[in-house]
Amino acid sequence: MRQVLARCARSWPAAGRRRKYRLVGVGRGRRPRGGEGSGGGKGAEQVSRGRAPARAGVVHAVVAAWRREKPHSRQRTCFCARVVMEALQMLAATTPAHGRHLRLLLLPLLLFLLPAGAVQGLETEERPRNREEECHFYAGGQVYPGEASRVSVADHSLHLSKAKISKPAPYWEGTAVIDGEFKELKLTDYRGKYLVFFFYPLDFTFVCPTEIIAFGDRLEEFRAINTEVVACSVDSQFTHLAWINTPRRQGGLGPIRIPLLSDLTHQISKDYGVYLEDSGHTLRGLFIIDDKGILRQITLNDLPVGRSVDETLRLVQAFQYTDKHGEVCPAGWKPGSETIIPDPAGKLKYFDKLN
């Protein structure tokens, strides 16, 4: 047991600063024998070096240090979990005869720590994440660190997307506000045309009207290349209409030519993988769907930053060019720029011009 506590003591973040594991004068009122635990010298830290006091004193000292942490704190919980893990590892490594003796020594410690939060600590530190929680992690980091500061990963559920590049876009239909009227709209209405389908969090907010107005002001440029634009949020069609009827100088949209689709059931947002369950609204997701209903491009923005109309228009033009000519577009390609023939010999025509 002394070895278990010694290992765990070193893992406590404050151990090196506050010397919480100095077992001086502990053990039910008895002073350590033979100078053990006296200030300075080899006995200064009984847990990590030197001979240890009585077993009851070790337990008493660690429990006292443990209680100085705030209740339910991460340090306290993780320390409990570490003690239990170390104890179980030692039990597994002992011989049968020695193991029986060690179990008797560790039993009081385990009985104290397990109800005190060690199990919770083990679950927090070791349990595997489910599929929805995995959406929050990539390369060991959190995808949405701003949300993580106020919402636990287990509670912040981002639905798995049915939208996959180069596959048919998830079907949707619903009520939209078009030219001030309620109309039924569905994805198949745009077959034969490119579609820019984008989600925004909520009506009557801050960045959202700037995006919708920007796309609306340049709608003719999209239509000139056989492309339509549809915006969608989780608001009702009535809220959409009220927003359109609000002047722009008051944060409204004013007259707008882009259809505003209502996703009141949140099903469309979930199918496209942009719905934030704990927030009740969506990320800024943008999807380019080609004239055959195939999803070609996905953009996801965090809430504070709006999207670029210029970049969206450029991407549509690039995909249409590759559809027609079978060539590929290099980085930053714009209409009139050089493209690349996608074969080992043909690509040299492009790269020779770079030198």
Image: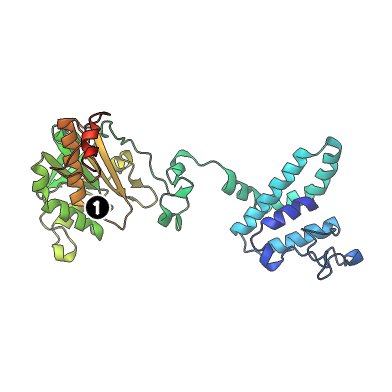
x 80%, y 66%: residue:
44
Q: Is residue 230 left or right of residue 98?
A: left
The image quadrant that residue 43 belongs to is bottom right
Q: Residue at x 11, y 53 (%)?
A: 217
The answer to which quarter of the image holds residue 348 is top left
Other residues around mark 1 within 10 Å, as few (<14) / some (14–19) / many (≥20) = many
Q: Which residue is mark 1?
A: 307
Q: Is residue 130 visible?
A: yes
Residue 15, x across and y down, in percent: 68, 62
Image position, residue 64 (x, y; %): 73, 63
Q: Is residue 55 above or below residue 272?
A: below
Q: How many marks?
A: 1
Please state, as top left, top right, bottom left or bottom right, where the C terminus lies in the image.
top left
Classify mark 1: helix, strand or loop: loop
Question: Can you name the residue that lies furthest to the front here?
Answer: 355
Closer to the camera in the image, 343 or 132:
343
Taking depth in this image into account, of 348 and 229 the one nearest to the observer is 348
Colour setting = rainbow
Amino acid found under the numbered disc labelled 1 = Arg
Residue beneath the point at 67% across and 67% down? 17
Where is residue 271 shown, x and y percent of the image? 31, 38
Farthest bottom residue in view:
39
Q: Position of residue 337 (x, y in %)?
A: 16, 43
Q: Quadrant of residue 303?
A: bottom left
Is residue 68 at all visible to an observer of this figure?
no
